[in-house]
Image (cartoon, rainbow, N blue to C red):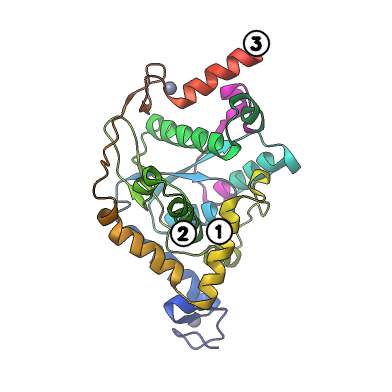
Amino acid sequence: MKCRKCGEKAVVNLREHRLSLCKGCYIPWFVDYTEKTIKKFRMIDRGDRVLVAVSGGKDSLALWDVLNELGYETFGLYIHLGIDYDGYSDVSLQKSKQFAERIGKKLVVVDVEKEVGAGIPELRGITRRPVCSVCGMTKRYYMNRIAMELGASVLATGHNLDDEVSQLLGNILNWNIDYLIQQSPVLPAREEGLKKKVKPFCYFTEKQTLLYTVLRNIDYVEMECPFSVGATSIFNKDILNQLEHRSPGIKRRFYDGFLNNKHVFLKDVVDEIGLRNCSNCGMPTVNEVCSFCKTKERVRSVVQ
Ligand SMILES: [Zn+2]
Ligand SMILES: [Zn+2]
């Protein structure tokens, strides 16, 4: 198998793009393709200040690296979730810090245990909500809040095509219309204080982001979040990979088909959700007090 660009020995065959590439050609292809995706969805403009949410994992660090290579103004945000299992949160923080130093960019660290009075594992017991839902809520809250405090205009996350299609499949199987409306590689800013959110890696598979990370010698946390073990999203990814193996490109077609046709089958649903500002912290919410402040209040009443 030879590289289609230069004829050297190829390291990867991108079946869905009908493209074989060598190591030297893969990295620039990956960076260019990210830029094409950014332009296609008008994700980031020159002059934007981009807050990159990093977890210490391959996708978010690779994203920060590529945005930096493309010359965008970036800084990172690491949210320490207080997950002790095998030092998960501490190790992830260390890898994120190392990477920030490598590219010479600022990394903001939020410690959930200090801020809320309890880490994610304890919050599960206190709120009696599924752990991934509390964790997601907490992360969204801080991403938005830090972006506001630091004057960032765009929030970027490392979600890849596998994340997107497994979420899409899950939402369709359960017909979660509210979530389907919200699922997009780019969500515009809202006046009430929601920042623009973008996913520049939405067209790369997990294998492709991994290959980039490895070829660029980026040191990342290989450990998955201990709470994700056995999660439905992982099972769905597996099924989608089986489909992809049989029909190369099916994940991409599934995703693009959804984005292109979303308006048709969600036509009658009102997509403007009424937002107001939390009476306690001022962040946008659909209720009088936001779910984050409610959670915090709950922790206070339990801990005291
Ligand atoms: Zn080549
Ligand atoms: Zn609030």
**Could you tell me which quadrant the C terminus lies in?**
top right
Mark linked to residue 236: 1
Mark linked to residue 55: none
Nearer the viewer's eye, disc 3 or disc 1? 1
Distance from the alpha carbon under mark 2 to that under mark 3: 43 Å
Q: Could you tell which of marks 2 and 1 lies nearer the N-terminus? A: 2
> Does mark 3 have its CB less than 8 Å from ligand 2?
no
Mark linked to residue 304: 3
Nearer the viewer's eye, disc 2 or disc 1? 1
Residue sticking out furthest to the top: 304
Residue beneath the point at 31% across and 29% down: 275
Q: Label 2, secondary structure: give it.
A: helix
Distance from the alpha carbon under mark 2 to that under mark 1: 9 Å
Taking 1 as reference, is 251 above or below it? Answer: above
Three-letter amino acid code at the position of disc 3 = Gln
Residue beneath the point at 51% across and 33% down: 138
- Asked whether residue 216 appears in the rendered view, the answer is no
Give the residues in magenta. Answer: 99-120
Give the residue number, with chain letter if any, for mark 2: 165
**Residue 188 location in percent, x, y?**
30, 44
Taking 145 as reference, is 72 above or below it? Answer: below
**Residue 16 location in percent, x, y?**
45, 76
